[in-house]
Image (tube, coloured by chain):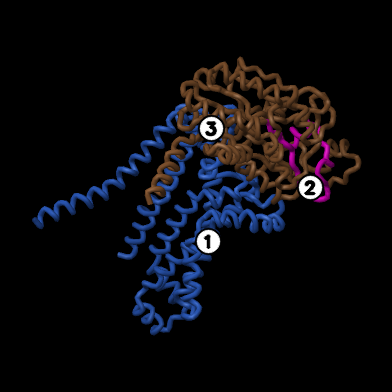
Chain colours: A blue, B brown
């Protein structure tokens, strides 16, 4: 009887685990299948071609791919140092009466739906940026800033939690040997939680690269590779969100799927590289 | 107790008897369809559920027969209708205006030659005080500010009609950009839907964009004075839209396929567009329900359509549509 329960339990959990794999494979298969006509028509030129003219049946994905990568990079450049700074302050430096409310505020910020960041970006941030940089305040830079604010609390919260796992005994030993606060941070805490920090960066990167709503509002929606990051551009999720409902020719529809497939491959590559390269390096160094 | 149950049952039966019509498509006429649906339900108890998902979506859904009627701003050609086995007729007429937000310049003060409008959207005229704009507006103090072009980011029947107009007033537009629901825009910011473009215009001083007239009224934008087909100045107002609608040459033989831009006449506003209803050819019982709704709208919906900034079909056109219904046995 017990054996039977064990067996059922074993098989059910195995089925759950495998179903994830099935979903992943099915996703790839569907995207690939739907993207096939566009792949046949444009081949790999799709990735480097910049012209997107649905009415002439010419599709090139470069502006969207470029916009996705650049806006994400800007967001990471802004968010990473600030998030790590916040985490250090909250876990190591702040007195409890400040650390607790600020920590809670950050967790709350992480729960705000992304569309709210988008609306805030369009109605408040864009006019301010317009006054600073000129132009119309919509573009890659604005998208990058909105994204960075969106992923910041998330990164800060994970990094802070990771830092809290540093054993006190390690820190106390360092202080006992006469280390300053800065030295303890640099040589004890940060090396100890490096994988946690990288993990939070990867998760945030994954969130930023696929973000749709926050960015649709502030990207400017132009299928062009802009000559400056202050000019309107587009990204893959933004293009998909804007154009799917009205994609009425087969090639148009298929080209959007091709873009979706490329987005999936980008996120996949980012996470795979991070997992297999950064984290392995870390593990080796620690041993 | 028994009485209550009977009453409840009766209500249930009646609700089942009332028709439930579902439609999907163009966002351009959505406000007036919602209004008509409300009137219709009040009067007859029949519900019309319209989803404003865009013309392309409407064509797709009615082709797949997942809704009872589809709506499109872009008329389908006879060949395509035959292939997809659809009927088509116009429901209401709307107009597209060049709406601007220029501090200091009021509604109807700015005159733009049709070809200059095309050059603005091509990115060739970049400043408001460009001499090509200035020469038509001697009394206006035009600012030396960069023009912020606002246009659609999604595919749209409004874009189709606007680009059709631009292609006929600028050969450069016709050659380099062309006509379509989604375009390779040479310049500008993209917004999703008429609402999105409206909010971009509101947000950005010194901007210009094209929106359906109702959105211009709702947001209090200025609308540029454009030119008729023969080059006369014509304001974006109701009489001029109506003047243009009069010239439409409808023909039931090709299922009313007709693009209304650039009609002749000295008062004809150049960018008016009819919006169309698509019905499946096989489902005649449901079609009768849908036709009953539009017949009701033709009879009682004119006032509301006008209030919302649309132009009701002229009486002769309505008669023509009714004959078309009768001919196909759905009236």
Image quadrant in which you'd find residue B304: top right
Image location of residue B151, percent across then percent down: 66, 40
Bounds of the magenta span?
Answer: B93-121
Inter-mark Cα distance, 3 to 2: 35 Å
Q: Residue at x 67, y 57 (%)?
A: A129
Compare residues B22 and B24 and report the one nearer the observer.
Answer: B22
Same chain under badges 3 and 2? The reply is: yes
Compare residues B169 and A49 and report the one nearer the observer.
Answer: B169
| Disc 2: which residue | B102
Residue B210 shows in this picture: no
Q: Is residue B129 left or right of residue B30?
A: right
The residue marked by circle 3 belongs to what chain? B
Q: Residues within 10 Å of mark 3 (few under 14, many from 20)?
A: many
Q: Which one is closest to the eye, mark 3 or mark 2?
A: 3
Label 1 close to label 2 by CB (< 8 Å):
no
As drawn, which residue projects farthest toward the left?
Answer: A1
Compare residues B280 and B210 and report the one nearer the observer.
Answer: B280
Which element is circle 1 on?
A: helix
| Disc 3: which residue | B58
Quadrant of the rendering where the N terminus of chain A is positioned: bottom left
Above or below B301: residue A185 = below
As drawn, which residue projects farthest toward the right?
Answer: B139
Image mark for residue A56: none
| Disc 1: which residue | A79
Q: Is residue B117 magenta?
A: yes
Q: Which one is closest to the eye, mark 1 or mark 2?
A: 2
């Amino acid at each position: 009887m017990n054996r039977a329960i064990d067996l059922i339990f074993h098989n059910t959990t195995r089925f759950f685990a495998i179903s994830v794999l099935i979903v992943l494979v099915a996703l790839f298969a569907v995207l690939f299948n739907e993207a096939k006509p566009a792949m046949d028509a444009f081949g790999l030129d799709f990735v480097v071609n910049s012209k997107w003219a649905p009415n002439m049946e010419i599709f090139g994905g470069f502006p969207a791919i470029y916009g996705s990568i650049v806006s994400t990079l800007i967001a990471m450049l802004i968010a990473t140092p600030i998030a790590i700074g916040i985490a250090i302050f909250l876990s190591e430096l702040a007195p409890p009466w400040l650390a607790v409310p600020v920590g809670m505020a950050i967790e709350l910020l992480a729960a705000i739906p992304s569309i709210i960041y988008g609306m805030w970006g369009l109605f408040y941030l864009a006019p301010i940026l317009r006054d600073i940089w000129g132009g119309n305040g919509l573009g890659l830079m604005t998208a990058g800033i909105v994204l960075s604010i969106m992923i910041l609390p998330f990164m800060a919260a994970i990094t802070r939690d990771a830092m809290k796992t540093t054993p006190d005994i390690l820190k106390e030993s360092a202080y006992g040997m006469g280390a300053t606060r800065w030295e303890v941070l640099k040589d004890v805490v940060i090396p100890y939680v490096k994988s946690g920090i990288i993990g939070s960066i990867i998760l945030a990167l994954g969130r930023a690269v696929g973000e749709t709503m926050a960015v649709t509002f502030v990207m400017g929606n132009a299928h062009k590779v802009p000559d400056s990051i202050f000019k309107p551009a587009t990204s893959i999720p933004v293009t998909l969100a804007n154009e799917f409902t009205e994609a009425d020719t087969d090639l148009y529809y298929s080209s959007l799927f091709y873009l979706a497939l490329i987005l999936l491959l980008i996120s996949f590559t980012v996470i795979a590289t991070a997992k297999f390269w950064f984290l392995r390096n870390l593990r080796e160094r620690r041993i | 107790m028994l009485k209550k149950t009977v009453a409840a049952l009766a209500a249930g039966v009646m609700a089942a008897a009332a028709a439930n019509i579902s439609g999907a498509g163009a966002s351009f006429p959505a406000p007036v369809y919602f209004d008509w649906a409300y009137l219709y339900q009040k009067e007859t108890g029949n519900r019309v559920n319209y989803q404003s998902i865009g013309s392309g979506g409407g064509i797709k859904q009615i082709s797949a027969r997942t809704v009872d009627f589809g709506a499109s701003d872009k008329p389908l050609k006879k060949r395509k209708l035959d292939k997809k086995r659809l009927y088509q007729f116009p429901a209401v007429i709307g107009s597209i205006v060049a709406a601007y937000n220029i501090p200091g310049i009021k509604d109807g003060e700015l005159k733009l030659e049709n070809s200059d409008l095309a050059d603005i959207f091509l990115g060739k005229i970049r400043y408001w005080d460009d001499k090509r704009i200035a020469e038509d507006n001697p009394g206006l103090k035009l600012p030396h500010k960069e023009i912020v072009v606002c246009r659609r980011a999604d595919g749209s029947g409004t874009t189709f009609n606007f680009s059709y107009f631009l292609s006929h007033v600028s050969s450069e537009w016709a050659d380099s950009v062309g006509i379509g629901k989604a375009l390779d825009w040479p310049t500008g910011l993209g917004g999703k839907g008429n609402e999105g473009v409206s909010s971009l215009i509101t947000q950005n001083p010194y901007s210009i964009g094209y929106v359906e007239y109702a959105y211009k009224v709702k947001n209090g934008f200025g609308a540029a004075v454009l030119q008729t087909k023969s080059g006369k100045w014509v304001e974006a107002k109701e009489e001029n839209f109506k003047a243009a609608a009069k010239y439409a040459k409808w023909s039931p033989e090709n299922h009313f396929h007709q693009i209304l831009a650039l009609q002749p006449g000295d008062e004809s506003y150049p960018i008016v567009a009819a919006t169309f209803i698509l019905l499946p050819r096989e489902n005649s019982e449901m079609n009768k329900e849908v036709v009953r709704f539009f017949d009701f709208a033709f009879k009682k919906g004119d006032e509301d359509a006008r209030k919302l900034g649309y132009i009701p079909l002229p009486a002769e056109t309505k008669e023509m549509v009714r004959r078309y219904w009768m001919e196909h046995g759905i009236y």
